């Protein structure tokens, strides 16, 4: 059981984000508002970081929830939250909780290190020694 | 000295070379050189000196032999020596310019020689000197064809083993090791070939096993080798490469014997300004130092060549032992990417990657690495990798608290034990014990005790201490502080036992495949440690204090 729900989270990242298949969001989420929100969010991140990749670092399952720790990496080649492309390589960690019922996500919570990401895009580069 | 005397000295020299009596060969050829200075005599003396590990003098004499053969118009023999010189300069002295120069000389000379076995030897030399494994395999195959056409048994076995090594490097591991097994079978069954060929085939087998992460094979061959050496009374033969010798010991779980060989190998090579022919002994010794928990010494050994492929395993083990998993997995990921994860040569690195990722609390990449290892294990005749995969999956499951951890880890213990890989089995048992600790503390204590006893016997101090700590945490009496294995090392105990049987230093040396000097050194240390004055006192001590085996 624990493995099944973890597999659902793994395949979500494999297909939707790393596989660039935003249409498939609807196969994973039931709530229409969630589907729309995740799709829009995914779209804007893929615009900003066309080579975006999310690697799942850790999955912990208990009851109907899966906790996921992940790291996204990519190159800033499009506008992100008003910052024009810088060409910088970024890495940011996220913590997420998925609630699962009948093989679908019925709830989703995410805390991403957006502040750290912004800092990587705006910080003055350290001059090369 | 008459011509007949010179001839007799030469034939005595060749006889001695064929039977491994290097000192006798040197003596006979020295006589012949003193009388005639012929290239034959110089060449023979060079070969004898090479076996006596005076590589520099060997080169000097064979260079003179080369000049002599050229002068006499024997271009084929001159070319053969040029090829040998090229190889020695490259392998032992890392002098690539000299190596290339001698290879060119040989090529030029062979332009004027009718096609024959020498062309095959040239292909073999080219195969050994190229860095492109694909090309190396092609050239070795071509040398093998020439060998079969010309009936040159030495060339055949050398080319066959070089082909095997190239195939292993290309990831065609099973095919390559099969070729090496075939060559080993031939050299140890006494098929006509020189002892140089014997030494080379052994070296290449060890190197290939190192690349393939296959430690059962050297172990299997070690019994055959020891038997061969005993039959032919070549005590010095196995000592031709201390690093290989150490590998054989380590594979059999005799870590202290391996350590001893490696320390001696490093001292010899450093003293002579040479490098090892095969596996880097400093990297090997560093791995052992990590096992013993002697990190500072491991670091010192690795200083200066940490980034070389040879040293990767030792560097990773050191970082893991020091609790720096992120540095360890970064090194491993890079190497695995270079090799390709579906390459069987990546297996030992994948196993370490699982450990590093778990230590870094990233169980998902650990799981992916364990999966990759399982895929590699699906091929037939991959029992060792299957046991590695079971261990890796068991560790991942244990890190997630999954029930199946114990059965996977038990599979790993059984798999390694069936292959006679005692160290691997004992370490897997330690993992098993940890996984059992929550639900079955009694079974966990039992597994930890067995792991500790085995690890201690093998000399893996650090892991043995971990097992002791685990036992204590489970409420059992584990030894606290540094373990005590008595005053004497295992090797010293072994020597003491033989001494008590009334053997002389020379006889002890022969029995243990070590030099009489080393045996003498051991006896001295035993007397010193036990505070005794004479061998007879030591023998009496042994009778009182050593249990019968």
Image (tube, coloured by chain):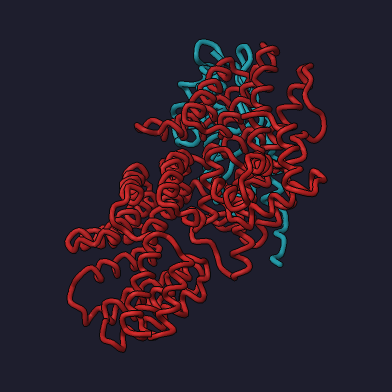
Chain colours: A cyan, B red
Question: Looking at the image, which is closer to me, B165 or B453?
Answer: B453
Q: Is residue B166 above or below residue B48?
A: above
Residue B346 versus residue B180: which sits nearer the camera?
B180
Q: Percent from the top left, x then y, of residue A44?
A: 55, 39
Question: How many marks are shown on the rendered structure?
Answer: 0
Q: Nearer the viewer, residue A119 or B500?
A: B500
- Using the image, determine if residue B435 lies above or below residue A81: above
The N terminus of chain B, quarter of image: bottom left
Q: Position of residue B62 (x, y in %)?
A: 41, 78
Position of the C terminus of chain B, as image quadrant, is top right
User: Which residue is rendered at x = 65% and y = 32% of the image?
Assistant: B455
Q: Relative to B215, is B395 above or below?
A: above
Q: Is residue B217 visible?
A: yes
Q: In the rendered image, is residue B326 in sight?
A: no
User: Closest to the observer: B537 or B391?
Assistant: B537
Residue at image coords 69%, 15%: B438
Residue B533 percent across, percent down from the top left: 80, 49
Residue at figure coordinates x 71%, y 57% from the top left: B300
**B347 sits to left or right of B7:** right
Specify whether B128 is left or right of A109.
left
Tell me which corner region of the image, top left, top right, bottom left or bottom right, holds residue B320: top right
Is B175 placed left or right of A74 in the picture?
left
Q: Position of residue A89 (x, y in %)?
A: 60, 51
């Amino acid at each position: 059981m624990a493995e099944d729900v973890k597999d659902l989270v793994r395949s979500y990242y494999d297909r939707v984000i790393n596989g660039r298949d935003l249409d498939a969001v609807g196969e994973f989420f039931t709530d229409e508002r969630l589907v729309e929100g995740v799709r829009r969010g995914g779209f804007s991140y893929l615009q900003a970081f066309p080579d975006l990749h999310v690697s799942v670092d850790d999955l912990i399952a208990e009851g109907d929830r899966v906790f996921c720790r992940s790291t996204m990496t990519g190159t800033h080649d499009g506008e992100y939250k008003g910052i024009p492309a810088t060409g910088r390589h970024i890495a940011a960690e996220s913590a997420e909780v998925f609630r699962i019922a009948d093989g679908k996500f019925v709830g989703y919570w995410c805390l991403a290190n957006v502040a750290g990401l912004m800092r990587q895009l705006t910080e003055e580069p350290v001059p090369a020694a | 000295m008459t011509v007949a005397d010179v001839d007799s000295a030469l034939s005595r020299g060749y006889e001695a070379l064929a039977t491994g009596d290097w000192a006798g060969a040197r003596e006979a050829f020295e006589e012949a050189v003193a009388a005639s200075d012929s290239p034959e005599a110089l060449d023979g003396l060079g070969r004898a000196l090479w076996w006596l590990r005076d590589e520099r003098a060997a080169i000097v004499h064979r260079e003179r032999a080369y000049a002599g053969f050229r002068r006499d118009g024997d271009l084929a023999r001159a070319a053969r020596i040029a090829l040998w010189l090229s190889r020695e300069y490259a392998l032992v002295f890392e002098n690539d310019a000299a190596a290339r120069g001698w290879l060119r000389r040989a090529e030029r000379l062979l332009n004027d020689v009718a096609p024959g076995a020498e062309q095959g030897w040239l292909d073999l030399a080219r195969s050994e000197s190229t860095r492109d494994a694909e090309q190396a395999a092609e050239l070795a195959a071509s040398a093998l064809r020439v060998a079969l056409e010309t009936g040159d048994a030495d060339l055949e076995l050398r080319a066959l083993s070089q082909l095997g090594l190239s195939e292993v490097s290309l990831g065609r591991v099973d095919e390559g090791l099969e070729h090496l097994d075939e060559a080993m079978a031939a050299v140890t069954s006494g098929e006509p070939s020189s002892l140089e060929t014997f030494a080379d085939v052994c070296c290449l087998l060890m190197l290939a096993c190192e690349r393939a992460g296959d430690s059962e094979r050297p172990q299997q061959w070690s019994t055959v080798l020891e038997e061969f050496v005993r039959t032919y009374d070549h005590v010095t033969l196995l000592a031709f490469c201390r690093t290989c010798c150490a590998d054989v010991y380590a594979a059999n779980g005799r870590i202290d014997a391996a350590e001893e060989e490696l320390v001696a190998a490093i001292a010899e090579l450093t003293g002579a300004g040479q490098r090892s022919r095969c596996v880097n002994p400093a990297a090997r010794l560093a791995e052992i130092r990590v096992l013993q928990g002697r990190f500072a010494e491991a670091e010192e050994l690795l200083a200066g060549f940490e980034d070389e492929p040879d040293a990767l395993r030792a560097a990773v083990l050191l970082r893991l032992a020091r609790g720096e998993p992120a540095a360890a997995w970064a090194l491993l990921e890079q190497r695995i990417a270079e090799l390709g994860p579906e390459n069987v040569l990546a297996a030992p690195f994948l196993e370490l990657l699982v450990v590093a990722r778990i230590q870094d609390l990233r169980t998902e990449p650990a799981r992916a690495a364990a999966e990759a290892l399982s895929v590699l294990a699906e091929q037939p005749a991959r029992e060792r990798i299957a046991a590695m995969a079971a261990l890796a999956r068991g560790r991942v499951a244990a890190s997630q608290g999954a029930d199946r951890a114990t059965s996977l880890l038990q599979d790993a213990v059984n798999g390694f034990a069936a292959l006679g890989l005692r160290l691997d089995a004992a370490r897997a048992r330690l993992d098993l014990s940890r996984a059992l600790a929550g639900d079955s503390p009694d079974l966990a204590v039992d597994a930890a005790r067995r792991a500790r006893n085995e690890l201690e016997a093998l000399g893996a101090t650090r892991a043995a201490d971990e097992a002791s700590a685990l036992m204590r945490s489970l409420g059992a009496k584990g030894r606290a502080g540094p373990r005590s294995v008595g005053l004497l090392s295992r090797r010293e105990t072994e020597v003491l036992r033989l001494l008590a049987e009334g053997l002389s230093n020379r006889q002890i040396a022969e029995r243990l495949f070590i030099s009489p000097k080393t045996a003498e050194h051991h006896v001295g240390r035993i007397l010193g440690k036990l505070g005794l004055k004479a061998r007879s006192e030591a023998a009496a001590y042994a009778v009182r204090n050593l249990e019968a085996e």
